Image: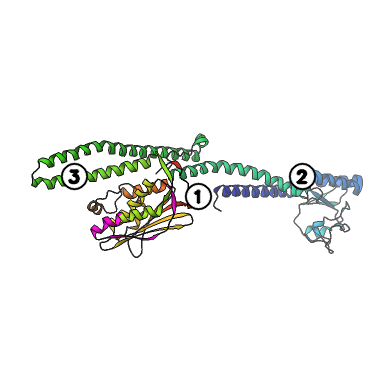
Amino acid sequence: MRSLFLKIFLAFWGAMAVFVTLASITTLVIVRFQTTDSAMEAMTRASVQAFQSGGPGALHNYFHQIERDQLFRAILFDEQGHELSGRPAPRFLGPDGQLGRPPVDGSTNGPPPPPPSFEELSKHHFPKHTILAADGHHYTLILLPPSRAHLWFLTAPTRLIGILVGLAATGLICFFLARYVTRPIASLRAASGRLAAGDLSARAGSGAISRRDEIGALVHDFDRMAERIENLITTQRRLLTDISHELRSPLARLNVAVGLARRQADPGTQSALERIEIEADRLNDMLQNLLTLSRLESGEAVEMRTSVELAALVADVVADADFEAQAFGRKVVLKTNTPCTVEGNITLLRSAIENVVRNAARYTDENTQVDVALEARDHQAIITVHDQGPGVPEESLPKLFLPFYRVDATRDRNTGGVGLGLSIAERAVRLHGGSVTARNGHPHGLLVELELPAIDNEKATPKLETATVRTS
């Protein structure tokens, strides 16, 4: 049972049912079998007086009144052990006076059993009291449980009705109690799920904030934490965007200055100017990636077009990446290319696939190849990119798609990477309703898998949509 609501509800309900049952049984037992000596003596003297004044009939009526008002079944014996009221023995004693023994023929509607003997009742631990009456004889009063006729609340169908009413009442109380306890937790779980999915505006507050107990404090703290996280991430995104925009103009002027300096530079300074130009180009590429990442994370509306032929797009990306990789003694090979169509923005899809493939070509070992495969399974287009490099430590796999994360900072500087390519790929794929995962391949290398929702070619229509992306 995984539902906290059901656990609390059933626990409360069971506890209340057991409590009510035990309380009822205990109360009944106490009422039946706990009487003071003075009360027993008064009851015994009243019984003897009723017998002496009116005989067995008057005693029978007095006992009937006791059983009705006090839930006792009384029996009076003289000193010879004779039962004086003439009432039959209760059925739970059985015909031979043994406790709990049913009639011999198994029926419950036979003739009434004979009056019990004093010796038979003395074998059981029933309350009893003996007095010396004014006539000089001893009389003994024994109290037994009442007959079924007076226990109307334990008899069918009233017994079943009582049980059902008790269960319904306790169940209703426990339902609202469990709901009161678990409702803020359900809201908290829903808000945390939305926050984990990238919706930074998710809050669990509403009515739970007014509660002054521990759960209300927890919800309040969660909302403060979510607000703080939203402010930090929003500030970070705004900072990245502002810095990227502000640096583009100085870099443009730097490129112009380098071009002018080349006209007047001697051959000895040409190499230094070329180095400056290379570094400026790298900064331009990084700023372009930052702007793309900022756009994907800002929630800005992005055009989504249908009928993107993914097979042609993957083949084109692989061909470009293979041409670039051959200059470094590496290859990029398209192993499988299943025709399939996805709905999306072709520019963002190309950027996502290209970043993953080029990242693999950059880190695969020399004289090895990167295997790329496009397959369609269960209405999903799956692109697999497997390099032959050293792989990634297991603890670093969940961090590969974080902006500016580097497994090896020195290696990334040597290859020109800044840790933004995979971040852009992950956010672009997520914008299209897909996912990106990374794991170490066998026997070595890194395997990155891009999964996108595919559409039927027959149903593809050239429509234009917009979508809003939220990222964590």
| Residue under pointer 3 | 277
Q: Position of residue 426 (x, y in %)?
A: 37, 49
Q: Position of residue 108 (x, y in %)?
A: 84, 58
| Residue under pointer 1 | 459
Q: Which of the marked residues, 3 or 2, is nearer the chain's N terminus?
A: 2
Q: Quadrant of the C terminus?
A: top left
Judged by depth in the image, the label closer to the viewer, 2 or 1, is 1
Q: Which of the marked residues, 2 or 1, is nearer the chain's N terminus?
A: 2
Identify which residue, 146 or 388, lies in the foreground: 388
The amino acid at mark 2 is: Ala
How far is disc 2 from disc 1 in space, using C-alphas? 92 Å
Instruction: Give the color scheme: rainbow, by chain, secondary structure or one colour.
Output: rainbow
The residue sitting at 65% across, 50% down in the picture is 18
| Residue under pointer 2 | 39
- Regarding residue 234, the answer to whether it shows in the image is yes
Magenta highlight on residue 342: yes
Q: Position of residue 114 (x, y in %)?
A: 87, 58
Report the disc number at residue 416: none
Q: Which of the marked residues, 3 or 1, is nearer the chain's N terminus?
A: 3
Magenta highlight on residue 363: no
Label 2 sits on a secondary structure element that is helix
- Residues tagged 3 and 1 counted as in contact (Cβ below 8 A): no
The residue sitting at 8% across, 47% down in the picture is 268
The amino acid at mark 3 is: Glu
How far is disc 3 from disc 1 in space, using C-alphas? 49 Å
Q: Which residues are magenta?
A: 320-343
* Label 1 CA crowd tier, 10 Å (few <14, some 14–19, many 20+): few
